[in-house]
Image (cartoon, rainbow, N blue to C red):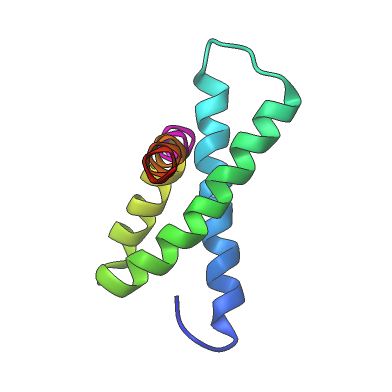
Amino acid sequence: MSEGPNMLKDIATSASLGGLAITARHMIEKEKRSWVEVAGRTGAAMIAAIFVGFAADAYVEHESLKYAAIGALSYAAPEVLSYLLAFVNMKGKRLS
């Protein structure tokens, strides 16, 4: 993700890829979810895609590999975010 005017374009591209990845996942799932849960999971995937886009830009040279990383993590975003929240909660309990 470059500095300057292209930054907003890169953010929009990453968020769109994240939204498309989780939308595809919702379409193939057999489990029915409420629209609130679908919206929350889609938002999480889009936000995760933005951060992955920034990280991929710093470490990955090939454009197609960047898009693959963004899509893959966006697809898995609900599980990744659930794991991170559980990890943070576990660490927080240890500090208490």
Q: Position of residue 13 (x, y in %)?
A: 55, 62
Q: Quadrant of the C terminus?
A: top left
> Which residue is farthest right?
35
The verdict on residue 36 being magenta is: no
Start and end of the magenta stretch? 76-82
Image height check: is 60 above or below 14? below
Q: Quadrant of residue 76?
A: top left
Apparent side of residue 38 relative to residue 53 in the rendered image (left or right): right
Q: Name which residue lies at 52% across and 17% down.
A: 29
Magenta-drawn stretch contains 79? yes
Image coordinates of residue 25 in percent, x first then y, are 50, 28
Residue 88 point in image, percent of width and height = 42, 44
Residue, far front: 96
Q: At which x and y percent is residue 61?
A: 25, 72
Give the number of marks.
0
Residue 34 placement: quadrant: top right
Q: Nearer the viewer, residue 95 or 54?
A: 95
Front in this rendered view, residue 93 or 74? 93
- Up the image or down, 33 lies above or below 48; here it is above
Magenta stretch: helix, strand or loop mostly: helix
Quarter that holds the N terminus: bottom left
Q: What residue appears at the point 53 percent right and 36 percent down from the top-left corner?
A: 22
Q: Place residue 55 in its image quadrant.
A: bottom left
33 lies above or below 90: above
| Residue plotted at (33% across, 52% down) | 69
* Above-or-below relation of 37 to 72: above
Seen in the image, is 8 located left or right of residue 14? right
